[in-house]
Amino acid sequence: MHWSEVVANALAAKGDKHIIASGITPSGEFHIGHLREILTGDMVTKACKAKGLDAEFVFVIDSADPLRKVYSFLSSEYERYIGHPLAKIPAPDENGNPSTDGRSYAQHFLEPFLEALEQIDVKPRLIDNYQSYANGEFASRIKIACEKADDIREIIERVSGRELSPDWYPYNPIGHDGSLDGVVVDGFEWPYVHWTQGGKAGKSDLRKAEGKLPWRIDWPARWGWIGVSCEPFGKDHGTAGGSYSTGREISQLFADQPPHPLTYEWISLKGKGAMSSSSGNTIGPLEALALVPPEILRYLIARSKPNKAIDFDTGMGLVNLVDEFERLSSKDLEAIELEGLSRRQRVNVEDEIGAMKMSYISHKNASILTFRHLAMLCQVKHDDEITEEFGTDISERLWRMHHWIDSEHFPEEMRIVIRDSPAPGLDDVYLKTLSEALQTCEWEVDAIAAIIPNCIKAAGLEVKTAYFTLYRAILGRDKGPRLAPIMAEVNRERILSLLKA
């Protein structure tokens, strides 16, 4: 049983209607590590629907969160916006300065992420947190939080093991300067909290977006009013004393039930460690989708249990991942007879079936052109030649493949550059024998692949020496991708001209 089905079974035992949630703070560029949470929630939702449950996936945009600091991609002009809600800050322009295009900071970073979600076939219901505060969705739970401030303080201090400041309060008002910083609550009388900032008094209406709950209270509060029954979250929130531990008790204080927890591990960039927006060690979702086919990005998440870390390799690891996906795509996994297989073999087959179901993009057509073959074609042929043979439906794949080939991620062992002129100093006898044999053979992969070893044997050369010579003659290097498929796609006369010389 696939991991998403295991979660769906657990939810089915609790009822027939479920809301699976995910959320994100649009404080900077998103990376594909964020996609793990989104795709995990999407896959659980799909598994619930497959079981006949009434399931919905929602995506919460934490635009009420404040700007924490001036990040490296922002100019010093953003100093004045620290502590302001992301929904109320202007978007940065290309130089990191506040722009005048009318978009908010939250919108600026959210839009490309939503575009990426569309490409990977994730279509959640969007919930904007700032607007939710403005609409009064949080009001009833803010009221309880203020009335039970001491109880919430006790829960957070006991469960998290940290001491809160004396002026801590379970609600952060927006002060006179539009910031949540430096505001001290000194009174509560529904529906207002009274506060001071810089010695100046003010009050905030708890039914409006005039402040927000701190994260450890905001999270369980939204579980309640949205009706969340399952939510994936990173391992930092799932540790003992973490946000979920305190949220679980606070949600019960609100007379709500905490959602089914689903903790996931980080995605790391191979050789570079866990992805982090603050450190710059990231690949953005759209950048990733310019390199990786969307169904492969889904497969990357689907094939690994949430509690397993993923080491994302955009070089040969990507090629091997696509090879695996294409191998499974070509098999009728459902027709495999499980009887007689070991338990481990049965589990593997069931995991593969589930992973493939969760990976397919609904609007994509299957293609007989493999990823490896397309990588080779894009380096030795013009696009119009490729589309003439395989159809214009592969135009998007062509664009993505060219982007990958031109990027720093493309593995050198797959790079192909056909020589323009003959290489000097090579074994004339072997190359002459080979060129004569290739002159009359059928110009296709299997025929060429059969002739090469026959000519090596006829010339009495060591295999290693012969292939070194052939790679030098055609690619100008000592080794590389398989030669027969490359030669078959290049004009025969061009290849022969390199060998005959």
Image (tube, helix red, strand yellow):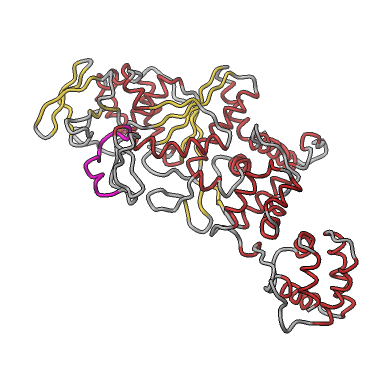
Residue for point 38% across, 23% down: 251
Residue 484, picture quadrant: bottom right
Asked if 498 appears above or below 200 in the picture, the reply is below
Indicate left or right for 397 with 124 as reference: right
Indicate left or right for 259 with 313 as reference: left
In the image, 17 versus 165, the foreground residue is: 17
Q: How many marks?
A: 0
If the image is split into quadrants, where does the C terminus sit?
Answer: bottom right
Indicate left or right for 297 with 482 as reference: left
In the image, 319 versus 379, the foreground residue is: 379
Residue for point 65% across, 32% down: 362
Magenta-tinted stretch: 75-87
Asked if 193 appears above or below 100 in the picture, the reply is above
In magenta stretch: residue 84: yes
Q: Identify the residue at the far bottom of this view.
A: 425
Q: Residue 389, image x and y in percent?
A: 76, 48
Q: Residue 343, image x and y in percent?
A: 74, 40
If the image is split into quadrants, where does the N terminus sit?
Answer: top right
Q: Most prominent secondary structure in the magenta stretch?
A: helix
Residue 177, picture quadrant: top left
Residue for point 35% across, 32% down: 63
Asked if 389 appears above or below 435 in the picture, the reply is above
In magenta stretch: residue 261: no
Q: Identify the residue at the far left of this view.
A: 199
Asked if 392 appears above or below 334 in the picture, the reply is below
Q: Residue 433, image x and y in percent?
A: 87, 77
